[in-house]
């Protein structure tokens, strides 16, 4: 599934007891409908719980903030359980596969490691991490 909206919660990275990084957030999406006069008007705002895991969670926590417009792709997940009082409960959420700024509604600066690039320690980048920004090369046309 694909979702467009704004981050409606604080973005805080957490870790499981096994030290696996994860991030839970909510994305708000406005809905619109046509009234009897044929004019477009805003309907209810929908809130979708999103869960991100591992590197995606780490990168999102370093990049995203509450209020930012985002695009999310992922899969629906659901869980059923009973309360201590014996009441049946059901919850649904999205497990994100991808998330990023909605460039139709904002701009972003991206940092990444090129595949196969080696760092100062000889480790190769995998294309999925966040790299430090490097100073630009000197302008060859700049006059002294």
Image (tube, rainbow, N blue to C red):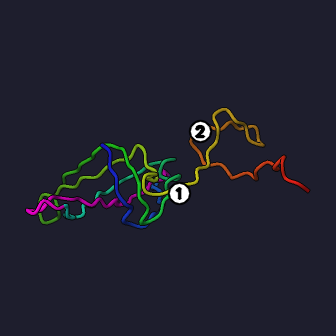
Quadrant of image for the N terminus: top left
Local SS, label 2 = loop
Magenta span of residues: 20-39
Question: Mark 2 packing: few (<14 Cα in 10 Å), some, or many (20+)?
Answer: few
Label 1 crowd bin: few (<14), some (14–19), many (20+), radius 10 Å: some
> x%, y% of residue 128?
56, 42
Residue 91 picture location, percent across and down: 22, 55
| Residue that label 2 marks | 127
Residue drawn at the location 53% of the way across and 52% of the way down = 59
What label does residue 119 carry, if any? Answer: none
Nearest the eye: 111 or 122: 111
Res 18 visible: no
Q: Which of the numbered marks, if any, corresponds to residue 63?
A: 1
Identify whether 69 is placed above or below 114: below
**Residue 121, horizontal then vertical, whole percent:** 77, 42
Residue 36 within the magenta-colored segment of the rendering: yes
- The answer to which of 128 and 36 lies nearer the viewer is 36
């Amino acid at each position: 599934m694909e979702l467009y909206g704004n981050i409606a919660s604080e973005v805080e990275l957490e870790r499981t007891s096994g030290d696996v990084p994860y991030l839970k957030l909510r994305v708000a999406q406005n809905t619109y409908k046509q009234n009897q006069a044929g004019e477009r008007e805003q309907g209810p705002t929908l809130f979708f719980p999103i869960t991100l895991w591992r590197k995606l969670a780490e990168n999102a926590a370093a990049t995203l903030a509450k209020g930012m417009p985002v695009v999310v792709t992922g899969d629906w997940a659901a869980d059923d359980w009973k309360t201590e009082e014996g009441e049946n409960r059901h919850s649904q959420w999205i497990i994100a596969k991808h998330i990023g700024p909605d460039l139709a509604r904002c701009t972003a600066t991206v940092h990444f490691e090129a595949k196969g690039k080696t760092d100062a320690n000889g480790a190769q980048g995998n294309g999925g991490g966040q790299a430090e920004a490097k100073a630009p090369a000197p302008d060859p046309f700049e006059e002294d």
